[in-house]
Image (cartoon, grey):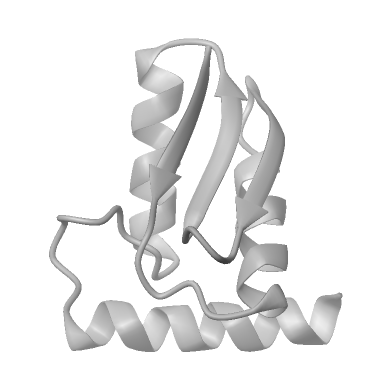
């Protein structure tokens, strides 16, 4: 199955690099793509459990799905993830 999720806090290529790397580490997720203009992350996944893991991971690294709580601590996590993505790209 394939899905596109609209996420919060997506700012740049550093964010995209981190998101792509982290999601690609989850078993049964592939073809991860980021659309900066639409603030979306798209990927193929195997089942609902895998989708849940992906959404949970996105929130954990600072990129919650639109409609989820986006606390100041979550925004701070996205800045750290972004910086790591910039340094490792």
Residue 49's x, y, as percent?
A: 37, 19
Left or right: residue 59 versus residue 18 is left
Residue at the location (56% across, 38% down)? 42
Q: The C terminus is located in which quarter?
A: bottom right
Left or right: residue 88 versus residue 40 is right
| Image position of 49 with respect to 58: above or below | above
Q: From the viewer's side, name the closer residue of 36 and 43.
A: 36
Residue 23's x, y, as percent?
A: 60, 44
Residue 54's x, y, as percent?
A: 45, 39
Count of labels in the image: 0
Residue at the location (61% across, 73% down)? 15
Residue at the location (34% across, 30% down)? 52
| Image position of 60 with respect to 82: above or below | above
Residue 64 lies in quadrant: bottom left
Residue 53's x, y, as percent?
A: 40, 35
Q: From the viewer's side, name the closer residue of 46 and 35.
A: 35
Left or right: residue 65 versus residue 82 is left
Left or right: residue 37 versus residue 5 is right
Q: From the viewer's side, name the closer residue of 29 and 3.
A: 3
| Image position of 33 with respect to 17: above or below | above
Residue at the location (36% across, 88% down)? 76
Residue 67 lies in quadrant: bottom left
**In the image, farthest residue toward the front:** 37
**In the image, farthest residue toward the right:** 89
């Amino acid at each position: 199955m394939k899905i596109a999720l609209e996420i919060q806090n997506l700012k740049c290529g550093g964010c995209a690099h981190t998101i792509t790397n982290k999601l690609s580490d989850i078993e049964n997720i592939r073809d991860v793509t980021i659309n900066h203009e639409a603030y979306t992350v798209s990927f193929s996944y195997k089942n609902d459990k895998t989708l849940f893991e992906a959404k949970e991971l996105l929130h954990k690294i600072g990129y919650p799905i639109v409609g989820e709580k986006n606390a100041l601590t979550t925004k701070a996590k996205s800045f750290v993830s972004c910086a790591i993505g910039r340094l490792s790209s």
